[in-house]
Amino acid sequence: MGSHHLLSLSSYLHKEHVSCRYLNSYVYISQNQKNPKPINSVPRSSISLWARTNPDYPPKISPQFPAWPNLAHTQLYILIFVSISEVAAYRNRGLILLKLLRSLMAVLKGKYIKFQGRKWSTFKLSKIVMALLLALGISMFIAFRFFSPTESSHSNLLHRLASVQHRAVHSDGLGKREDQWVEFISWEPRAFVYHNFLSKEECLYLISLATPYMKKSTVVDIKTGKIKDSRTRTSSGMFLNRGQNKIVSNIEKRIADFTFIPVEHGEALQILHYEVGQKYDAHYDFISEEFIRKGGQRIATLLMYLSDVEEGGETVFPAAEGNFSSLPGWNELSECGKGGLSVKPKMGDALLFWTLRPNNTLDPTSLHGACPVIRGNKWSCTKWMHVNEY
């Protein structure tokens, strides 16, 4: 009979150099004694995970990229059955119970336990079955009573945050970055904030690099594909070259490390400057069918904030689903920022949101805009990423 081990998922992730907080979950690992392997030898790339936030609101995990960052952002409870050869994840209690019952039946049929030369009467076998079922019922009650999400644990989901400390492969950069952590803010759209993604020195360097070349921002005419001026976008901006120098290249590699989207799939960095009163009205980042031959559709956007803003300048998602008025910092937002899910600019932070859903359809909740700056200046850096190499 195979040996079994119960181990905390957070401990397992810690061995994989990923530290999770506010993550309560367990992994059930089955190993074959004929071919034993240590727990930490299970390759991370072979594990596909589906995380459950609550019964009525399953998470969206992209099939194109590993689910690890999404898993790390999921703060509630996950019950995952793992074997050396395969991984099966169960998203509700019914399937978990079904799995346990099937395992029990396999035991009763002698699949895992062989009675060596003993004759067991129907009466004795029924007593064993009843005892096992009773033990199963008690264990299920304890597990779901004390380790399952309650109504209170689901309340205010958007500001009960999960975090992960990334081990970025390319850690080079200009200046010293503060402790980095990831904040999950929404499933509709899928959006995360990478706190302290850039150092102060990197932010100031990008601003100084772009300042001499800033021009009035434009938009792309959807019908003609040509660049044009528009009242919907009143900022100024410029594009750097991809891999323009070592500092820019390191930032682009860091983006790939955090998003799991290769550098080659990204457009060049765009630096934007918003002065008082300047804005960018709500819009989508995906492009029309006529212009996706190069790289395919835009799959995600990373907005890096290069400066703090005294008042206004929030990134707002007016079509996001949820009640945001109870979130911390709501009263500090401008009237524009209160028009939906909002992220207040903070120097060094980066906002990642997905423009495509996991089924490769456009996400209408990714509609977003830049609120007018009321006091101060806003500097930001945008990275658009595509499905294919761009």
Image: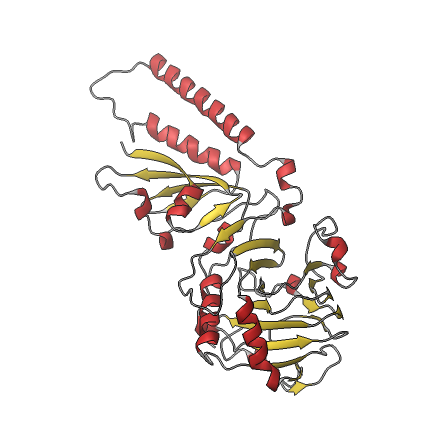
The structure residue drawn at horizontal position 21% and vertical position 39%, both measured from the top left corner, is 34
Q: Is residue 80 left or right of residue 275?
A: left
Q: Is residue 162 left or right of residue 120?
A: right
Q: Residue furthest right?
A: 335
Q: Position of residue 205 (x, y in %)?
A: 54, 75
Please tell me which residue lies in front, 134 or 203: 203
The structure residue drawn at horizontal position 57% and vertical position 58%, both measured from the top left corner, is 192
State whether residue 249 is above or below residue 311.
Answer: below
Q: Position of residue 330 (x, y in %)?
A: 74, 54
Quadrant location of the N terminus in the rendered image: top left
Q: How is the image coloured?
A: secondary structure
The structure residue drawn at horizontal position 53% and vertical position 55%, both measured from the top left corner, is 181
Residue 287 placement: quadrant: bottom right
Q: Position of residue 223 (x, y in %)?
A: 66, 83
Q: Position of residue 362 (x, y in %)?
A: 60, 66
The structure residue drawn at horizontal position 56% and vertical position 61%, both measured from the top left corner, is 357
Please tell me which residue lies in front, 1 or 335: 335
